[in-house]
Image (tube, rainbow, N blue to C red):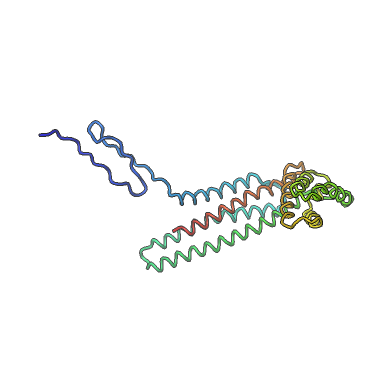
Amino acid sequence: MPENTPHTVLPAEPTGEFQRRVTGSGTESDPLKVYPMPTAQDPVAAAIAKQRQGVTQYEAAFRSGADLSVNLPADVRQMVSQAASAITGTVGKAQDARKRADSFLNDQTMWPDGRRMMAGDAIKAAQDSISESFSEADAKMAIADALLYETSRPRLAQADAMTARADLDMITRSAISANSPGALVNSLKTLASGDDALAALVADETYLTRFLAANGIAQDVAQAIVTNVKAAVVASAAASGDPKRAAAGRTSQALGELRKARAAATSYARNTLNAK
């Protein structure tokens, strides 16, 4: 009789949460060994998880960068903290609603139409609540941003106003005459980075806006210039030796991280609630 040869039985195709890695030839000296391996995470689920992590990371960066000490007015501290809580709170709302909706969809004791209706109601309620949270956060961040800027910028003494305006006209005349927005914004940013009367003058958003309009700068270009100048004012304040201006400047800069958290939370909530 022919010599018996080992019969190799290959494992079934992997199913469920695990795949299998098989080694060995199936002989007595080299038996088959099966090692379960987790399957690769679904790319959509991975993207949603990354958005959730982004909310946490950006909010932490905000807390790290902001100066929420007594150097900041109490109402502003409260406002930005409430905005941060409103944003991060949407993550839990979306998760809870998704679980609740899925529990309805998987409830075999209910008619299919009833399951879908209850799930839809849970999602709609969460969407409304999350929308309110974002609106609250947006309003608080907008108000806080304005208040922080006012605290950040230096003040112009009335006695220095006339001289500062004349100096500003002289310094910017060349860039305005040459119709060079790039040169103009660079000059204004340099002025805004100081702590003298000229810095205080260009840091006054109302005055700067009127100055640009009076010199024929297009509205969209003027708005971009004002935005850049304000950023320079805030950066200068953040590095200031004045504790209150520094706290306002650092917190104003940190709001950028909170806005990133808001964007990540928006994507996370939308994708979580719309998941099938």
Residue 124 left/right relative to 19: right
| Residue 112 percent coordinates (x, y) | 38, 67
Q: Quadrant of the C terminus?
A: bottom left
Q: Nearest the camera: 182 or 2?
A: 182
Image quarter in which the N terminus is found: top left
Q: Residue at x 45, y 60 (%)?
A: 100
In the foreground, 195 or 115: 195
Image-quadrant location for residue 262 = bottom right
**In the image shown, does 175 or 255 lie closer to the viewer?**
175
Give the residue furthest to the left.
Answer: 1
Q: Is residue 188 left or right of residue 83?
A: right
Horizontal and vertical percent position of residue 219: 74, 58
Query: Quick check: 109 above or below 176?
Result: below
User: Residue 20, percent across and down?
Assistant: 33, 42
61 vs 51, left or right, is right
Residue 37 is at least partly visible in this image: yes
Please provide percent x and percent y for residue 58: 59, 48
Residue 244 appearing in the image: no
**Residue in the image at 43% along x and 49% along y:** 42
Point 51% across, 64% down: residue: 124
Residue situated furthest front in the rendering: 178
Q: Residue at x 69, y 57 (%)?
A: 143
